Amino acid sequence: MEDYPEEMRSPPVSLVSVAGCPDLHQTISTHLHSLQPPINTLALPDLSKISLLLAPNPKDDQSSIPDSAASAGILKRDWLLKHRTKIPAVVAALLSSDCVSGDPAQWLQLCSDLDNLKTVIRARNIRLVLVVVHSHSKGEFDQIGNVFDIDDITEDRMLALRKRAEIDSKYFITFSQNDETELKQSLHRLGSIFGELANIYYRDEGRRIKARIEKKSCSAVELQVRYCFKASLVAVYAEFRRDWVEAIRFYEDAYHTLREMIGTSTRLPAIQRLIEIKTVAEQVHFKISTLLLHGGKIIEAITWFRQHNASYRKVIGPPEAVFLHWEWMSRQFLVFAELLETSSGAIQSISSLIAGTIEKSLTEWEFRPANYYQLAAKYLKEKRSYLESAVSLSETFNDSDNSTDSVVPSLFVGQFARLIEQGNAFLMQPLTDDEYIHYAISEGKRFQDSIEIIALLKKSYESFSNFKVQRMAALCGFQMASEYYVVGDFSSAKQLFDGIANLYRQEGWVSLLWEVLGYLRECSRKQGQLKDFIEYSLEMAALPVSSDTGGVQYSRKECNPAGSASIEQKELIHKEVFELISGELSLTSLESNADLRVTGVNQLHLEIDLVSPLRVVLLASVVFHEHIVKPGSSTLITLSLLSQLPLTVEVDQLEVQFNQSACNFVVNSQRTLLDSANDDQQSQRVEAAPSLSLSQNRWLRLTYDIKSDQSGKLECISVIAKMGPHFTICCRAESPASMGDLPLWKFEDRVEAYPTKDRALAFTGQKATQVEEPDPQVNLNIDASGPAFVGESFVIPVTVASKGHAVHSGELKINLVDVRGGGLFSPRETEPITLDSHHVQLLGITGPEGEDESNLGADNIKKIQESFGLVSVPFLNSGDSWSCKLEIKWHRPKPVMLYASLGYSPDGNDSTAHIVNIHKSLQIEGKTAILINHQFMLPFRNDPLLPSKIKPVPDSDQLVTLPLSETSILVVSAKNCSDVPLQLISISVESDDDIGKLCSVQNSGDQSDPEPLVPGEEFKKVFSVKPKMNVSKLMLGSVRIKWRRYAGIGDQPGSAASLVFTDQRLPDVNLELSPLVVSLECPPYAVLGDPFTYYIKVRNQTQLLQELKLSLADAQSFVLSGSHNDAIYVLPKSEQIVGYKLVPLASGMQQLPRFTVTSTRYSSAFQPSSGESTIFVFPCKPHFNMTDVGDRTIESLAAAAE
């Protein structure tokens, strides 16, 4: 389609001409191009230049022209281009307002130019538009807002100008460019008038030519075709009015008239006349197809192409010009394929289109461009064939003849002439048919048709592949590969043939596969690829070709290099291959010009796996007669071989290979008994067989004993068949139970045989057996004393004791597995305690006491990971033992399964000795030993007022609030949650370095004589906390408890190796400044009848005066002196003390008078608890032995509070 001129391929666009005012041409052209549909412009600087473009060409009646002059050709070659680029439909004369309103000389010149313009365009019926362009910028405004026309153009002058041009008033317009708005309006008005007049022009031209056709005023058939073509082109311009039907009808009339000319026109020689008719018909068909596809009528377009193909397919012409016909046919399919591929009418799905074409009998292939690409390639191959024949038959053809250089296209479409120079002029001399054929042959030889054929087939191949139409893609690929083979590109051909052969193997197309393999075989031969040549040849020889296949001839198989598929041809290929293998023949390479032979230097080895196409050449089945055997016990193994080669194959030697190399053995044929027993065979077991001959479709069965001393899986891997001194085939062993059929032989009429005589083995037999492990004579013991605790390094002893076997190359593997299956690794990025991310961690493996790891040999291995460990076990004689200790640490309470595996060799002299494995497992519970709790308390008989507790905020954080600059009590408790006694060493609060500046925490030292904690017992310790600085949140640090297992009285508590540290972070606390602090002071005890003072202290820590109400209730055990209800005022930053005298009236624990302090400002009341209001009254004054308690005063007070 790219060979067609642009005016044929692109849609028609109206053409207008603007003359004068060149400064506006760019603006007008840009606006016209932006319209829909666009309009092309032809710009001229002034009106006088229009005569250079449109020379006067009066259109007289065509009947006055003689037929001989009018019928020189059907269609001029540049007619379409002329109407697209040279002959406008409308001419717009742009007149400056200065010229219109100028002096009389300017007016006369303007009138003269208009007269000349009318004379030029009237001959071609071109429409005229007058445009007066204002030359001023912006004028003044009148009372209603319109712009004054300051150009002095009178109405009479304007009327005279319109009459002079003989145009309607609507086509006489003014063009204003005062501002952007007026410019857009003027351009819009100008574009509308251009579109209207262009449509009128093309419609009138169509009617004029239509009238001539209906009157039949022209007698020459060529003129009728020309008028039909012109009318149809005018109808194409009318597509802006969607007049598709009229355009297609005129094209069809021209097309049918052309078809009638084939037998009637005698104007040109026969061959050239036919070429001209076909060329014009090709262009008419192209326009019809384009219109149909552009309108979305894809079914009608395909139907029309079918009619076009049927009309001209048999119009071949004389024998010497047949190649021109097939070239023309190829071009028709190529162009239609490109139209169908790029047309917007093909957007519908093919399935919906096919569903509506049942009555029109269109097939699915006719909707696919790939089909037309393939047929285009087919006809181009026909053209090449006939061109070669024409060249060979042409006696006068000479490559050095330059007479064809002067042949050029004529003025008419489809015609050629010889360009002759006569003086200063050039003349067109008509050609004879012989000269034209000579020119066509020389042009045909210049082009390489194979390259074009490959390109067409490649498009078809890719298109079919994209639509998953594999079989058609394979056909196109085969044709493309054949072309590569013809041009000598054997590498590309071989690559394509390989892919096609895979498809034909899968689908079982034997005859097609034979042809592809024949090409592959020849490509390998020409490239000197000996191995590939033998593989393809063996596969061809093993194909299921019947005796009557050779008589069936296919249309494509005349050029098949392998010949027809027959038994005789298979036998010839078989003989050729084995003559190559034996060294009698050689393979000659065209690329290297060398003879390739199978020799000792150039040995040949073929591999046949489970999916190889060479399974038909050699199939190996291996079956063990027993599924389980004891170590050292013999069992039977049956080796079966099958070949589909047409002739008997003699195998010299078979080598059977297993996964245990000690079981490999060799089978020699007694017919040959190779005298060169090499070193490899001397180290292997050698068996003899009466015969190793393979006949077609007959199993060769061999049964032998086999014994293995190594436990585990014993599997036959492959069977290597040696044929001749330098050729081997390695065939992958297959189990009869899972052996698949040969795809190409599955449906052939042949005798079905089984690889073994035993039918049970044929259906259930396997190529592998299981060798049991011997009973181990080594004990592996794992001992664990009780559960493991979080944080401690738990030691587990492992003992290896030999009872009868010596331990060589021993390896002990340790694995830790989560019992619940959740894994030992924590997926969380942030742990509550800074520990390893593994919940349970293997820290190390230590050997027996006194063993020096630096003396371990190079064979000793020790690898430790978080949940895996590997350590070498030293050599042990029978009766010896060896032990080690596993050190495991729990970071979270989790049950763990400990797996220990011991692998050793009982015989250290043989490197391939059997490895005996012993497995033991032990479940260990990881528990939390110490449960840590804490509690914040206020000092005894001291209560600060916290504002956050007066009006708690809902949904606030639940952090504990402590008073600022006041001492608070932190009670830490440690409880034994395990089932064994523990020894508590110390409890401390570990703070960061920065916390000491913010807060003071008084920490006690370690206990001088720690006592054991029995299961369930709880120990408490008291700390004092005093915040120093006011911060939003205070981090107190972590509680650290130092403990260990209690091992009895003789245990040494200072042993650092047995200590365990358990840490728990204290929560953050809020700090608040207490506005009021209320405290109660009284003696620690009282004596019956002795008065004492009872003080109530209120400390104001604010800058405000605080009003408090104090009330005191009576108590039956005391006589009270003082006011029961009172109001007191506490000054800022001061303390108020209220005292009462009490006389106890009863002994024992007595309740003091209860008092209530109420803050008026904060609406809060304080009342001491019952514990704080209790005092012990002695009946008489006691006598105590006082000691210095030092810093334990606060602890004693806290203990008393409990």
Image (cartoon, rainbow, N blue to C red):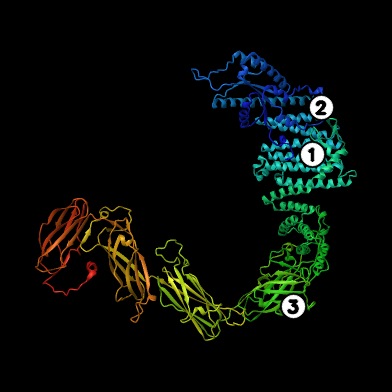
CA distance separating discs 3 and 2? 97 Å
Neighbour class for label 3 at 10 Å: few (<14), some, many (≥20)?
Answer: few
Q: Which residue is mark 3?
A: 678
List the single residue furthest toward the right.
395
Amino acid at circle 2: Ala
Neighbour class for label 1 at 10 Å: few (<14), some, many (≥20)?
Answer: few
Dot 2 lies on which element? helix
Q: Quadrant of the N terminus?
A: top right
Q: Which mark is residue 311?
A: 1
List the single residue furthest toward the bottom.
879
- Residue 464, compared with residue 1119, is above or below; it is above
Q: Position of residue 117 (x, y in %)?
A: 70, 20
Q: Nearer the viewer, mark 1 or mark 2?
A: 2
Dot 3 lies on which element? loop
Using residue 916 as the reference point, say whether residue 53 is left or right of it.
Answer: right
Q: Earlier in the sequence, mark 3 or mark 1?
A: 1
Q: Position of residue 1078 (x, y in %)?
A: 20, 58
Q: Which residue is mark 2?
A: 70
Please tell me which residue is depicted at 64% across the width and 42% down the height of the picture: 347
Closer to the camera in the image, 193 or 186: 186
- Residue 775, compared with residue 42, is above or below; it is below
Using residue 1072 as the reference point, say whether residue 236 is left or right of it.
Answer: right
Q: Do the residues bearing badges 1 and 2 touch, measured as CB atoms within 8 Å?
A: no
